Image: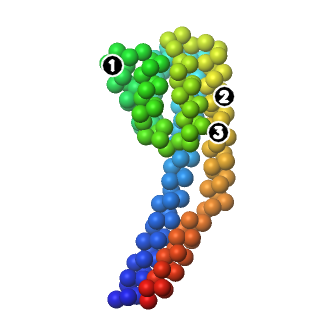
Amino acid sequence: MKIIGALFIVAASFVFGFMRRSGYLKEELLLKKLSELLYEIRDNIEFRSNALKDVIINCAVNDKYADLDFLPLTLEKLDSGATLKVAITNAFEESDCAAKLKKSEGLELIELFTSMGSDVEDVVIQNIDYVISRLNETKQQLSEQNKKQKGYYETLYTLAGAAAAVALL
């Protein structure tokens, strides 16, 4: 019976390590989705001359961006009469996406969203390009870190679980 308990502790420790590492992988995926969203916004504004509000609405209903929970919140705020700038900024601040990001990336996105008005200027497009480059840099660093630490958390937690199991036996 003790052996089964020890095996359970080791298995549970491995699962905890896997969950820890998957959190970092989710952050990397979130940064990728945010970059894709910003690319789409920029391309639709700059090359297709679409209205910013229409672009945001189209992105919010696109399944590709289903992980970005602030987009549906933005639609709700737009429906209640808020301006686009206020709607997207407030929705992002209230979202899980903002909570999952590092503080610096979150602040850069908030600054970008507050610079967005009904009229799109070259400055906004330049801000979008800047934020995209910062998100991509962070994503690249996180990706490299995840590659280096592949299996690290699983091994660390499994060894800790094995030590605990041995101590209990």
Using the image, determine if residue 78 lies above or below residue 133. Answer: above
Residue pictured at 33% horizontal, 19% vertical: 79
- Quarter of the image for residue 63 reads top left
Residue visible at 65% across and 14% down in the picture: 122
Q: Which residue is mark 1?
A: 79
Return the x and y of residue 26 as percentages of the image width and height: 51, 49
Q: Estimate how packed mark 3 is, as few (under 14), some (14 to 19) or many (20 or more) residues with alpha carbons within 10 Å.
A: some
The span from disc 3 to disc 2 (Cα, nearest Å) is 10 Å
Q: Are marks 2 and 1 in contact (CB under 8 Å)?
A: no
Residue 8 screen position, x and y as percent: 40, 78
Residue 96, percent from left and from top: 43, 40
Query: Does residue 2 appear left or right of residue 152 in this picture?
Result: left
Query: For this rendering, which residue is in front, 104 or 37?
Result: 104
At label 1, which amino acid type do we have? Asp
Q: Quadrant of the C terminus?
A: bottom left
Quadrant placement of the N terminus: bottom left
Q: Which residue is mark 3?
A: 136
Which mark is first along the chain, 2 or 3? Answer: 2
| Mark 2 or mark 1, earlier in chain | 1
Q: Earlier in the sequence, mark 1 or mark 3?
A: 1
Task: Give the structural element (helix, strand or loop) at label 1.
Answer: helix
Amino acid type at mark 2 = Tyr
* Amino acid bearing label 3: Asn
* Mark 1 neighbour class, 10 Å CA radius: few under 14, some 14 to 19, many 20 or more: few
Q: Which residue is mark 2?
A: 130
Residue sticking out furthest to the left:
80
Residue 47 appears in the figure: no
- Between the C-alphas of marks 1 and 3, the distance is 32 Å
Q: Secondary structure at mark 2?
A: helix
